Image (cartoon, helix red, strand yellow):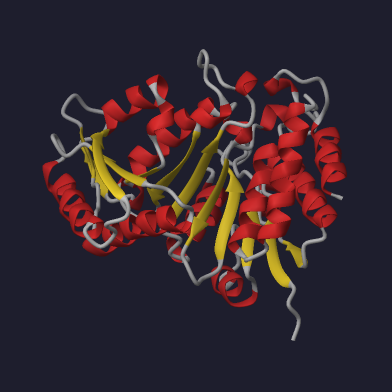
Amino acid sequence: MSDRKKIAVVPGDGIGKEVIAEALKVVRASGAPVDFTEFDWSADRYLRDGTTIPDDGFQMLARDFDAILVGALGDPRVPSNIHAKEILLGMRFKMDLYANVRPVRLLDESLCPLKNVKPEDVNFTIVRENTEGVYMDMGGAFKQGTPDEVATQEDINTRKGVERVIRYAFEYARRHGRKKVLMSDKSNVMTYAGGLWQRVFKEAAGEFPDIAAQHIFVDALCLAMVREPRQFDVIVTNNMFGDIITDLAAALQGGLGMAASGNIHPGRTSMFEPVHGSAPPLAGKNVANPLGAIQSAAMMLAHLGLQQHADRIDAAVLATVRARQLTQDLGGSIGTKEVGDWVAKQVS
């Protein structure tokens, strides 16, 4: 029986195709025992034959693959972006990938917009609940287009959903040698949902006496992330707040082009992706930053138990940053492919 891992690849739209190509190049250079199968689920496919994802697509991914690597999705030729919603959100919801994991790591102080901040000051992880909250698209509108219009958007939080993501955050902290888990909410206003998060967090914390449990309101968290990012180890929060604070956190490490992520359900096929958008105006110009995609691929390898290969890729990314072989968004002067070549050379 082969020990090689099977990876489904969805390059997506715009610059997604370009950065994923560089991530695959680097993984191949690392010698990791993986095989890639690419799928053309994208705006091009949707415009060609109306397919967003085949009827058995999610079942096939879960059954036949060990992990999924996805590029950015979104294209102005599809104004509704229905293909992006059905593919990306479909993976998260229908495959129940409940933990969105975003490492926030500054590789070089030149990449951080804050004064006097060093790499050791920005090194934490955000765990975002990934399948509930306002993203469940529950609500409605009444008397649209009139002065009496009413719009509602439901924030759905279940005991099961809250408990498992909080428990994942504590287990992640213990597994990675972290000492603190901070839960962030807005329970002083969102009393019902916040009350659920508060109770579950306190109960779970009692099962992890070696991990310090802390709490902060999300608005105060945004302030603290800018003033003193060094204080954080692991942050866990709900879907919407996680969406917001992870973009703020990305700025601390050099921007969205540096940000990697995993959408994880332990024991099941999980999905990894850079978090920037498809940026159609930049597509085809060889200017997109591939380091977020490359680091997402390294996360994927680590998740699959290929830690040695993941470590080599992370070290190669660090060496590339220190050599200033970077795209324009990071103050460099080379292109997407050239950055990928540099990282691959460091790995091989």
The vertical placement of 228 against 165, above or below, is above
Whether residue 77 is situated above or below residue 49 in the rendered picture: above
- Near-viewer residue (133 or 326): 326
Residue drawn where x is 62% and y is 61% of the image: 68
Left/right placement of residue 56 relative to residue 157 reads right
- 16 or 186, nearer to the observer: 186
Q: Which residue is drawn at 29% across and 47% down?
A: 212
Quadrant of image for the N terminus: bottom right
Tell me if I can see residue 322 in this picture: yes
Residue 14 seen in render:
no
**Image coords of residue 146 (percent x, y):** 22, 27
Task: Please tell me in which quadrant of the rendered image residue 345 appears.
Answer: top right
Q: Spot the residue most to the front.
A: 210
Q: Is residue 289 left or right of residue 66?
A: right
Percent x, y of residue 125: 46, 43
Image position, residue 219 (x, y; %) = 28, 27
Residue at image point 71% right, 32% down: 289
Quadrant hosting residue 50: bottom right
Q: Position of residue 126 (x, y in %)?
A: 43, 43
